[in-house]
Image: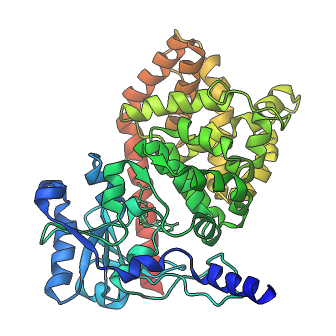
Amino acid sequence: MKILKFKNFVFFKNDDGRRKYLKQPPKIYKKETHGISLEKIDHHAFLIVKKLQDKGFQAYIVGGSVRDLLTGRNPKDFDIVTNARPHTIKALFHRANIIGRRFRIVHIMFGKKIFETATFRSIPNREIDEELLITRDNTYGSESEDSARRDFTINALFYNPVTEEIIDYVNGYRDIKKKLISIIGRPEVSYCEDPVRMIRAVKYKAITGFDMEKSAYKEISKLAKNITSCSPARLLEEIFKIMRSGVSLEIFHSLVQTRLLKYMMPEVYKKLYPHSQKIHRFESSPLGRRLKVMDELIDRGRKISNVVFLGILFYDLVREEVENSTHHDKGYISNIYLTKASQRLKFSKKAKDQLVKVLIMQSRFLKYNLTKKKSPAIDKLVMRDYFKDGLDFFEIFCRIEKKWSDQLLFWKDIYKNNKNKIFDKRNKRINIKKLRSTYKKKKS
Ligand code: ATP
Ligand code: MG
């Protein structure tokens, strides 16, 4: 009996549910079937793939952009994958940098656009007594392995823009047609290997409107606590992506339901649900209302900064404390109440300082006498580098409360009239920074 158990254990750990994808040849979908038009492919992404292929390498467009093209969305960027190694890729392109600690990838630049170009990676190949959590995944692999090491089948399709074929090792094409999010491998293994995948699962479910296997969704609640083992930088990156998605209300609702939020941002969760047993409607909570208004603005094409995102998330941590405090320096008080949350997610000191300023300036928007369109105080405030963030944040409040529309219009006008001056100042700052860094480089 014991031997059987041990055998099961060995089998269990080694079979992470991915190996089956390596045994079968890929399904190939021609243009007549998938219908992706070459016009939708970024010209430079095409050139990168073409150049790599001309040099004898395999190269494809991969991941989110292929998923987006097949689901009728416009990809925001194009990631590329190849069997060429980072140094070879770098040598082939004029402006290319090798980056990354977890995995070395190459950033190829054309103008302001950056194309992430990665070398095929292998699937985790662990010894039976090893932890599931992947801390380093830097082994190169084959094309099929690279597909099988990805998170969801819908994210693991390769598109060859030269032949206009989709190469599918994991039945991702079928899942897109079935509107289904399937995890590659067994959910409990995949989530333990990289808990960020749990956040990504709820994110894609909301963004695509696809279904997800019930067992895979349930597994998230069971393993939610594992999210604490992820690096703060990766968590923050996913949080910002969610906030930019335009469906952040729905995603945060799922983060609450699955208890992920409780472990990602315990301070925020505690403010939402101080009496932990009872989870009332998230949409009508203060955070839910802010997210809803923010989604509406993003839907209309508004660009919102990360500092404003942080404000939306963390406002409840400081609101009461600042309002109730008799201390003259509200910034000082805000800083104190934001310390724990900011340390947990390790956002930069600069972001935290900007955030405090944005929060504190809210009351100033209401204080001004609206008949006076010009004053030294206004001139000074409008030239602050956090003015636009403060104003975006103020707009969210005005929309929630459905009041202060005069104040909002007044300040928006001020911003519009000073836009050129503000941009000039910003450009000057950027130029000085550039000059400084070239000077430093030359010196060293
Ligand atoms: P979006 O950028 O819109 O969130 P995306 O699919 O492009 O979606 P990225 O984070 O840019 O997501 O990642 C690119 C690709 O890398 C994904 O499509 C997926 O194939 C793979 N990937 C990203 N994160 C993971 C992960 N945690 N585990 C496994 N594969 C991942
Ligand atoms: Mg992407």
Residue 397, position as x, y percentages in the image: 59, 23
Query: In the depicted view, which residue is nearer to us: 61 or 4?
Result: 4
Residue 326 lies in quadrant: top right
Q: Residue furthest top?
A: 371
Q: Residue at horizontal 65%, vertical 32%?
A: 287
User: Where is ligand 1, by quadrant?
Assistant: bottom left
Query: In the depicted view, which residue is nearer to us: 363 or 168?
Result: 168
Residue 321, position as x, y percentages in the image: 83, 33
Is residue 39 something one can see in this rendering?
yes
Q: Residue at horizontal 29%, vertical 79%?
A: 25
Check the image and report above or below for 217 versus 285. below
Residue 15, position as x, y percentages in the image: 57, 80
Residue 343, position as x, y percentages in the image: 74, 58
Query: In the depicted view, which residue is nearer to us: 55 or 97?
Result: 55
Residue 188 lies in quadrant: bottom right
Residue 264 placement, left or right of 379: right
Q: Residue at horizontal 28%, vertical 77%?
A: 95
Query: In the depicted view, which residue is nearer to us: 166 or 252?
Result: 166
Q: Residue furthest right?
A: 326
Q: Quadrant of the N terminus?
A: bottom right
Check the image and report above or below for 13 versus 68. below
Residue 438 placement, left or right of 277: left
Check the image and report above or below for 95 versus 288. below
Check the image and report above or below for 286 versus 92. above
Residue 297 placement, left or right of 158: right
Q: Residue at horizontal 67%, vertical 57%?
A: 349
Identify the image's colour scheme: rainbow, by chain, secondary structure or one colour. rainbow
Residue 351 placement, left or right of 49: right
